[in-house]
């Protein structure tokens, strides 16, 4: 089982080894990944606040987007727990766990930001399924 886990870890980390500078410690890699997540989270919150501001005149929409954002946070956390379900993730997944955790958080956070940004940028006219997303001129 440990051999399988090591092989899977190596396969997952191989793409990272191509993009990461040689000589970094695992602690530095963990910090770099978590800093990237913090930046992604700041951007998500900035976009979310702009959406709330631009749509403040639509109380129903604001209530619904707040509920959706709360549900997304619940999803994000549950998704992360499904990726790393062990009772003690550091023990089960090793020293790369903080890096992997932050990378997963960054990925889902950037995807959510992209979805929220649609309310700011709008979409081309002709999409009959836009709902509350504004039409871009």
Image (cartoon, rainbow, N blue to C red):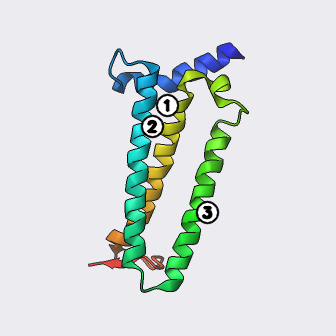
Tag in front: 3 or 2? 2
Q: Is residue 19 above or below residue 57?
A: above
Q: CA distance from mark 1 to mark 2?
A: 7 Å
The circle on residue 137 is none
Q: At 38% from the left edge and 47% from the top edge, which residue is drawn?
A: 39
The reply, left or right, for residue 70 in relation to residue 119 is right
Q: Secondary structure at mark 3?
A: helix
Q: Earlier in the sequence, mark 1 or mark 2?
A: 2
Circle 1/circle 2 CB separation < 8 Å: yes
Q: Which residue is mark 1?
A: 99
Q: Looking at the picture, how far across and down is residue 83, in whole percent?
A: 63, 38
Q: Nearer the viewer, residue 102 or 116?
A: 102
Q: Looking at the picture, how far across and down is residue 136, in whole percent?
A: 30, 76
Q: Looking at the picture, how far across and down is residue 45, in whole percent?
A: 42, 59
Quadrant showing the C terminus: bottom left
Q: Looking at the picture, how far across and down is residue 71, in whole percent?
A: 61, 63
Circle 3/circle 1 CB separation < 8 Å: no
Residue lying at the far left in this picture: please name it. 137
Q: Secondary structure at mark 1?
A: helix
Within the image, what quadrant is residue 54 found in? bottom left
The circle on residue 34 is 2
Total numbered circles? 3
Within the image, what quadrant is residue 115 found in? bottom left
Q: Which residue is mark 3?
A: 71
Q: Earlier in the sequence, mark 3 or mark 2?
A: 2
Q: Secondary structure at mark 2?
A: helix
Q: Residues within 10 Å of mark 3 (few under 14, many from 20)?
A: few
Q: Is residue 16 above or below residue 37?
A: above
Q: At 38% from the left edge and 75% from the top edge, which residue is drawn?
A: 53
Q: Is residue 79 above or below residue 115?
A: above
Quadrant showing the N terminus: top right
Q: Residues within 10 Å of mark 1 (few under 14, many from 20)?
A: many
């Amino acid at each position: 089982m440990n051999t399988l886990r090591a092989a899977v870890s190596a396969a997952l980390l191989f793409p990272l080894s191509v993009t990461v500078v040689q000589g970094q410690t695992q602690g530095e890699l963990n910090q770099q990944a978590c800093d990237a997540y913090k930046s992604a989270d700041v951007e998500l919150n900035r976009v979310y606040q702009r959406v709330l501001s631009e749509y403040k005149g639509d109380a129903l929409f604001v209530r619904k987007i707040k509920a959706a954002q709360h549900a997304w946070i619940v999803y994000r956390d549950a998704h992360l727990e499904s990726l790393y379900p062990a009772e003690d993730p550091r023990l089960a997944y090793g020293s790369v766990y903080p890096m992997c955790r932050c990378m997963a958080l960054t990925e889902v956070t950037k995807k959510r930001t992209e979805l929220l940004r649609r309310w700011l940028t709008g979409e081309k006219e002709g999409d009959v399924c836009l709902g509350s997303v504004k039409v871009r001129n």
